[in-house]
Amino acid sequence: MLLQIRLLYERHLVQLEDKIRNENRYVSLEVSSLQNYLVHYQSLEYQLWSI
């Protein structure tokens, strides 16, 4: 009985870890996308000031 409960909790923990890993991957993609926009914006701003 205790072993079954432990296995259930371990499986649940593994699923949670996978979920967190996937969400972290998504968040890091969003952050890199925002960084790209920022770099693009800064370069546009620089070009405007150069005129």
Image (spheres, grey):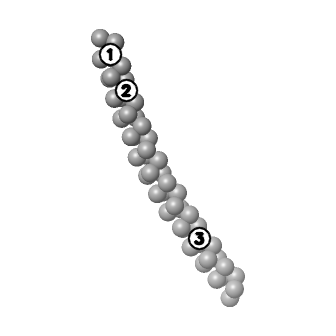
Q: Which residue is mark 3?
A: 39
Q: Name the outermost residue toward the top.
A: 1
Q: Residues within 10 Å of mark 1 (few under 14, many from 20)?
A: few
Q: CA distance from mark 2 to mark 1?
A: 10 Å
Q: Amino acid at mark 1?
A: Leu
Q: Name the outermost residue toward the bottom.
A: 51
Locate the N terminus and report the quarter of the image it occupies: top left
User: Relative to the observer, which residue lies in front, 48 or 27?
Assistant: 27
Mark closest to the chain's N terminus, 3 or 2: 2
Residue drawn at (64%, 83%), measured in percent from left and top? 47
Observer-side mark, 3 or 2, equals 2
User: Relative to the observer, which residue lies in front, 11 or 3?
Assistant: 3
Q: Which residue is mark 1?
A: 3
Mark closest to the chain's N terminus, 2 or 1: 1
Residue drawn at (63%, 73%), measured in percent from left and top? 42
Observer-side mark, 3 or 1, equals 1
Mark carried by residue 32? none
Q: Residues within 10 Å of mark 3 (few under 14, many from 20)?
A: few
Which secondary structure, mark 1? helix
Q: Compared to 13, does 37 lie above or below?
A: below
Which secondary structure, mark 3? helix
- The x, y position of residue 19, in whole percent, is 39, 40
Q: Amino acid at mark 3?
A: Val
Q: Quadrant of residue 50?
A: bottom right
Q: Amino acid at mark 2?
A: Glu
